[in-house]
Amino acid sequence: MMERTLKHRRHRHTMSTFRALTVERQGPVATVRMKPLRVSFNLQPYAEIHEEMGLAMSQLRIDDDIRIVILTGEVDGEFMVPPPTSEYRSGDKQSGRLGDPRAEWGRFHGIIRAHQAVAEMEKPVIAKVNGDAMGFGQSLLFNCDFVIARDDAKVCDMHLSLGEARTSAGGEPVGPAYSLMPGDGALSFVTLFMTPTMAKEYIMLGTEISTVELARLKMINQAVPMADLDRAVDELVHKLLARSREVLAYTKRVLNRRVVDNLNSTLDPAVAYQLFNFRQQLAGS
């Protein structure tokens, strides 16, 4: 009787339309694919992934047809990285986007909603890291319940890297050339994975870490060759689906109490400081 009642109550929610990401369904699994920021930020009008991620994850959280969420990049080689440093120069596209007061609410509260939804979601969220994860990308990575990454990718916060962070493919540096407060979630999660001294080195110096090293330190679950990434994620999904939906939900809620508590005490001030930091930077530009 209980199972029949639960099935009767389950219903599918209609997803919103997104421009910075896509949401695909395959049975009980939803895959969220993030478009490269160099693409979505240059659309007319630009697409704000922070706002869209908050909405997508909130909708998936309450969708009873979905049991597992996979987060990945749309283009192999890039989980999520910021646009090139040259686009953050004074007066260019990124300064215009970041200085748009009409977009501040959606962007900054989108960050909060996205992380809250992932941390509180009563279903596992898997980061399928198919490329470099920097900035908001690495913040999302560290908030996911499982992380399986390709072994030739790198992870970096880059907010304080002064435009020196480069992707695995090389080329032009990415991220702002100025010091920027990390306000997109890193300060809420990195200290759960690293000692205080290592967390400060990673954040304050914009240190890059390979996914192989993260796996060796047991900070992520696996780092595998790109050719094996699909298989490794599919195996994890199969194992999770063999468990009870309700028991997984209860277990995640208890396991994530420390994550949620840390998020609640640190994310709001970090977001506020970054907003203040942006306004300082734009006022002096």
Image (tube, rainbow, N blue to C red):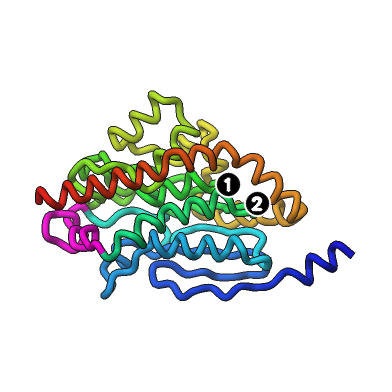
Identify residue for label 2.
236
User: Circle 1 — which element?
Assistant: strand
Circle 2/circle 1 CB separation < 8 Å = yes
Residue at figure coordinates x 49%, y 33% from the top left: 193
In the rendered image, residue 15, in percent from the top left (x then y), is placed at: 53, 73
Residue 134 visible, this orientation: no
In the rendered image, residue 7, in percent from the top left (x then y), is placed at: 78, 69
Residue at figure coordinates x 32%, y 43% from the top left: 182
Identify residue for label 1.
146
Question: Which label number is shown at residue 242?
Answer: none
Q: How many marks?
A: 2
In the displayed structure image, the side of residue 208 where residue 264 appears, left or right: right
**What residue span does the magenta drawing correspond to?**
85-101
Amino acid residing under circle 2: Leu
Amino acid residing under circle 1: Phe
Task: Classify 278 as above or below 213.
Answer: below
* Residue 252 magenta: no
In the rendered image, residue 235, in percent from the top left (x then y), is placed at: 66, 53
For disc 2, the neighbor class at 10 Å (few under 14, some 14 to 19, many from 20) is few
* Residue 99 magenta: yes
Residue at figure coordinates x 57%, y 52% from the top left: 126
Residue 96 visible, this orientation: yes
Residue at figure coordinates x 75%, y 49% from the top left: 247
User: Circle 2 — which element?
Assistant: helix
**Nearer to me, 143 or 5:** 5
